[in-house]
């Protein structure tokens, strides 16, 4: 059975106050404990993001990647929009790497696809450009197709991409949820075999009081639509159980009475 739904931990991100402080202090133990906990909880890859608004981006990324790699051999998702910070992460990474991410902006693609090629990485293609995030599923699919085509011009096959429709907070853009579900479905028609898809799940619940419930429900909806990877919180036990149950229901995990323990 296909091992679908790559679980990428969102937690090693300077956006979280405690993680941001640990990066500032170069507190290796804090980061390594965090990385090990993600792996114990079932993370299959680790998103690493040094956090917003720092002037030591490349140095912080190099330290973060090296520090995590001392205790974990999971693939890393290098989460930065800065080419210098990205390259610092790529240079430091020993294990398999997902670049997170390029957008459809010409100058972004011109920088990030050659790096992807040079470092033999995979890459997340985020549906946005200088004009922002497209409003409809169709416009997102069109933008995804543009990134697939541009990647191929750089000799990067669609199999190396993850298409990301860009999840927006339901508290601010309630009409977007079903468009994201539709976009995930449409992305799979853009190539043969179907391209892989990823979301930043927790975006959906930003600014709400029911974060975990909204995350869990949206993930189940997206799994039904064929999502193949999620950047999410593996420490949310109920979320992880829903992923397992979803895999059983999609016939991607062998049913047995003990399926939650597998
Ligand atoms: N697509 C891709 N990459 C992404 C995203 C995406 N990376 C970043 C983000 N979105 C996914 N990761 C997170 C990480 C944290 C949170 C949401 C998404 C989050 N953090 C708390 C908050 O902002 O409320 C921090 C709380 C705290 O300070 O402790 O919600 O869409 N490709």
Image (cartoon, rainbow, N blue to C red):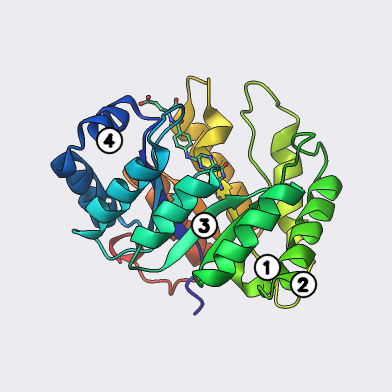
Q: Name the residue located 23 percent from the left edge and 51 percent from the top edge.
A: 67
Residue 121, which numbered label? none
Residue 248 drawn above or below residue 53? below
Q: Name the residue located 35 percent from the left edge and 65 percent from the top edge.
A: 259
Residue 99, which numbered label? 3
Task: Judge left or right: residue 100 versus residue 104.
Answer: left
Task: Judge left or right: residue 125 versus residue 94.
Answer: right
Q: Which residue is the site of mark 1?
A: 195
Instruction: Kindly tell me whether residue 250 is visible in this rendering.
Output: no
Task: Judge left or right: residue 61 versus residue 112.
Answer: left
Q: Name the residue located 58 percent from the left edge and 33 percent from the top edge.
A: 204
Dot 2 and dot 1 residues touching (CB under 8 Å): yes
How far apart in space, not on screen, are marks 2 and 3 (Cα)?
Answer: 21 Å
Q: Which residue is the site of mark 4?
A: 23
* Mark in the foreground, 1 or 4: 4
In percent of width and height, residue 243 lies at 45, 55
Dot 4 and dot 3 residues touching (CB under 8 Å): no
* Mark in the foreground, 2 or 4: 4
Q: Mark 1 or mark 3, which is nearer the start of the sequence?
A: 3
Task: Judge left or right: residue 72 versus residue 149.
Answer: left
Q: Mark 4 or mark 2, which is nearer the start of the sequence?
A: 4
Task: Please tell me whether mark 2 sits on a helix, a strand or a loop.
Answer: loop
Q: Residues within 10 Å of mark 3 (few under 14, many from 20)?
A: many
Number of disc labels:
4
Dot 2 and dot 4 residues touching (CB under 8 Å): no
How far apart in space, not on screen, are marks 4 and 3 (Cα)?
Answer: 20 Å
Instruction: Kindly tell me whether residue 101 is visible in this rendering.
Output: yes
Q: Residues within 10 Å of mark 1 (few under 14, many from 20)?
A: many
Residue 191, which numbered label? 2
Some atom of ligand 1 lies within 8 Å of the CB belonging to the residue at label 1: no
Task: Please tell me whether mark 3 sits on a helix, a strand or a loop.
Answer: strand
């Amino acid at each position: 059975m296909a091992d679908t739904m790559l679980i990428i931990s969102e937690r090693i991100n300077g956006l979280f106050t405690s993680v941001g402080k640990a990066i500032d202090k170069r507190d290796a133990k804090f980061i390594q404990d965090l990385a090990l906990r993600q792996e114990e909880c079932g993370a299959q890859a680790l998103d690493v993001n040094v956090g917003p608004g720092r002037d030591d981006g490349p140095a912080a990324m190099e330290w973060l990647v090296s520090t995590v790699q001392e205790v974990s051999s999971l693939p890393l998702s290098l989460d930065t929009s800065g080419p210098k910070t990205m390259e610092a992460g790529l240079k430091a990474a020993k294990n398999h790497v997902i670049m997170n991410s390029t957008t459809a902006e010409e100058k972004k693609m011109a920088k990030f696809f050659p790096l992807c090629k040079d470092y033999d990485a995979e890459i997340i293609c985020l549906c946005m450009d200088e004009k922002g995030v497209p409003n409809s599923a169709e416009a997102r699919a069109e933008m995804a197709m543009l990134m697939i085509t541009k990647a191929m011009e750089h000799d990067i096959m669609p199999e190396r991409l993850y298409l990301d429709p860009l999840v927006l907070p339901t508290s601010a853009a309630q009409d977007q949820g079903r468009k994201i579900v539709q976009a995930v479905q449409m992305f799979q028609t853009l190539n043969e075999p179907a391209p892989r898809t990823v979301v930043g799940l927790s975006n959906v619940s930003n600014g709400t009081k029911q974060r975990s419930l909204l995350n869990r429900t949206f993930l189940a909806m997206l799994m039904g639509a064929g999502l193949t990877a999620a950047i999410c919180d593996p420490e949310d036990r109920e979320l992880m159980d829903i992923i397992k149950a979803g895999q059983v229901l999609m016939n991607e995990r062998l049913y047995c009475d003990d399926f939650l323990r597998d």
